[in-house]
Image (cartoon, coloured by chain):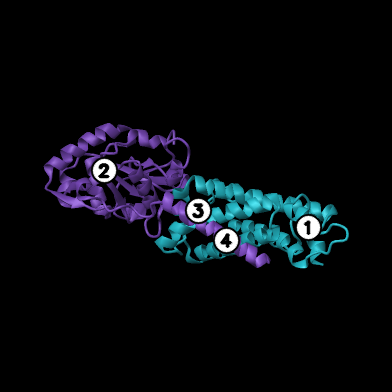
Chain colours: A cyan, B purple
């Protein structure tokens, strides 16, 4: 079962590959924008009024670097399911943060893509929750079914599955 | 195995992020103004009497001159980074430049009379904001947004501090406080903004 997931091919594999590349590309782009202007992103983090200063300082850099690493892993298809799980977890936290901002009635800009607002314009709102929810669903799909075609995971799974060799279920599951 | 690898990615990101934050830390708060760069202004009552009419945006150099004449007439006291509306009004009467840190659409509706528009996002591009060209880093500026929970004025203040400005004041009650006091505002879009 686990092997089938990691080696899913055909149209399903193609779809998973498209979703994986889209999600990875989005997060590499978002991370790049944040890392190019950390001062701007720190303002967004602070404006949420959730973290104390020392954690806001760390989050300003840790969040985009985690996004960058997870995005890069998704692009090359290495540890696809783990990387998608990381991104899904981050998106869940972002959604909770946005909901908290909306509940408190704060007027805050997203900071998701730096000063660029490709999907939702203006202050944080329901649009940002919908945007992140769509990305969260994509993340969960890749977490569940793997990265699809053209991934390092698939190559590694292929190496382990040469004729006459047994599959290591634990390795194949990732 | 998935969880382990996910934690490994997060851990690696945290380590790199911590190193990055140590190498190039961000400024989260407006630094306290050192004594040498604090703004001295006439006492509020005297300021209104001694000050000259405020000159709008394009007269930045003229406004700076007026500031000098206004200050000479009053007995000075020292202002910190965060100021009240009456203190801001005293600076306004001296011709000190006001900066509106709110978003474009809000600025287009109404603003402190003569205020220029400068947001933190304008500092994110490769070129410095155009507004910096008409501002003198050695002169005081007053920044405001919508008051209350609004952080925009502090964000612009940090950016200006990083650009070499020393006499930065935040009008904490923002434009609502200014309007409630009945002080002058401009309304409608500004040509060229």
In the rendered structure, are the residues bearing label 4 and label 1 in contact, judged by CB atoms less than 8 Å apart? no
Say which element carries label 4.
helix
- Badge 1: how crowded within 10 Å, few (<14), some, or many (20+)? many
Mark-to-mark CA distance, 4 and 2: 44 Å
* Chain of the residue displaying label 1: A
**Residue underneath mark 1:** A157
Q: On the picture, is A27 further left or further right than B140?
A: right
Front-most of A145 and B169? Answer: A145
The residue that appears at 57% across and 64% down in the rendered structure is: A93
Q: Chain of mark 4?
A: B
Q: Is residue A155 left or right of residue A97?
A: right
Q: Which residue is labeled 3 in the image? A: A109
**Residue at 44 percent of width and 49 percent of height:** A39
Task: Confirm whether circles 4 and 2 share one chain.
Answer: yes
Check disc 2: other Cα within 10 Å, few if <14, some if 14-19, many if 20+. Answer: many
> How many residues crowd around disc 3 within 10 Å: few (fewer than 14), some, or many (20 or more)?
many
Earlier residue among tags 4 and 2: 4
Query: Pointer 2 and pointer 1: residues touching (CB < 8 Å)?
Result: no
The mark lying in front, picked from 2 and 1, is: 1
Tally the marks.
4
Query: Can you tell which of label 4 and label 2 is closer to the viewer?
Result: 4
Q: Which numbered dot is residue B10?
A: 4
Distance, label 1 to label 3, CA atoms, is: 43 Å
Q: CA distance from mark 4 to mark 1?
A: 24 Å
**Pointer 4 with pointer 2, Cβ within 8 A:** no
Q: Which residue is mark 2?
A: B140
């Amino acid at each position: 079962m686990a092997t089938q997931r990691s080696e899913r091919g055909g149209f399903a594999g193609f779809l998973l590959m498209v979703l994986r590349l889209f999600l990875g590309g989005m997060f590499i782009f978002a991370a790049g924008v944040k890392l190019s202007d950390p001062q701007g992103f720190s303002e967004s983090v602070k404006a949420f009024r959730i973290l104390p200063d020392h954690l806001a300082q760390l989050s300003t850099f840790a969040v985009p670097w985690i996004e960058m690493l997870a995005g890069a892993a998704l692009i090359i298809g290495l540890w696809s399911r783990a990387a998608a799980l990381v991104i899904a977890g981050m998106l869940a936290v972002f959604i909770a943060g946005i909901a908290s901002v909306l509940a408190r009635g704060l007027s805050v800009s997203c900071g998701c893509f730096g000063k660029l607002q490709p999907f939702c314009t203006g202050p944080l709102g329901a649009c940002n929750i919908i945007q992140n929810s769509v990305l969260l669903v994509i993340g969960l799909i890749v977490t569940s079914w793997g990265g699809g075609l053209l991934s390092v995971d698939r190559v590694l799974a292929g190496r382990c599955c040469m004729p006459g060799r047994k599959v290591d279920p634990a390795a194949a599951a990732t | 195995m998935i969880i382990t690898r996910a934690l490994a990615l997060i851990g690696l990101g945290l380590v790199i992020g911590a190193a990055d934050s140590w190498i190039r830390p961000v400024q989260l708060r407006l630094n306290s103004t050192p004594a040498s760069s604090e703004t001295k202004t006439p006492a509020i009552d005297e300021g209104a009497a001694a000050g000259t009419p405020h000159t709008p945006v394009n007269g930045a150099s003229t406004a700076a001159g007026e500031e000098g004449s206004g200050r000479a007439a009053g007995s000075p006291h020292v202002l910190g980074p965060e100021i009240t509306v009456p203190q801001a009004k005293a600076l306004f009467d001296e011709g000190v430049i006001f900066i509106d840190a709110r978003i474009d659409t809000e600025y287009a509706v109404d603003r402190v009379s003569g205020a220029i528009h400068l947001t933190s996002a304008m500092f994110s591009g490769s070129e410095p904001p155009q507004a910096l060209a008409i501002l003198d880093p050695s002169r005081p500026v007053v920044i405001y947004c919508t008051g209350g929970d609004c952080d925009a004025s502090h964000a612009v203040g940090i950016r200006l501090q990083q650009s070499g400005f020393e006499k930065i004041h935040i009008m904490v009650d923002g434009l609502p406080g200014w309007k409630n006091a009945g002080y002058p505002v401009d309304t409608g879009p500004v040509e060229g903004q």
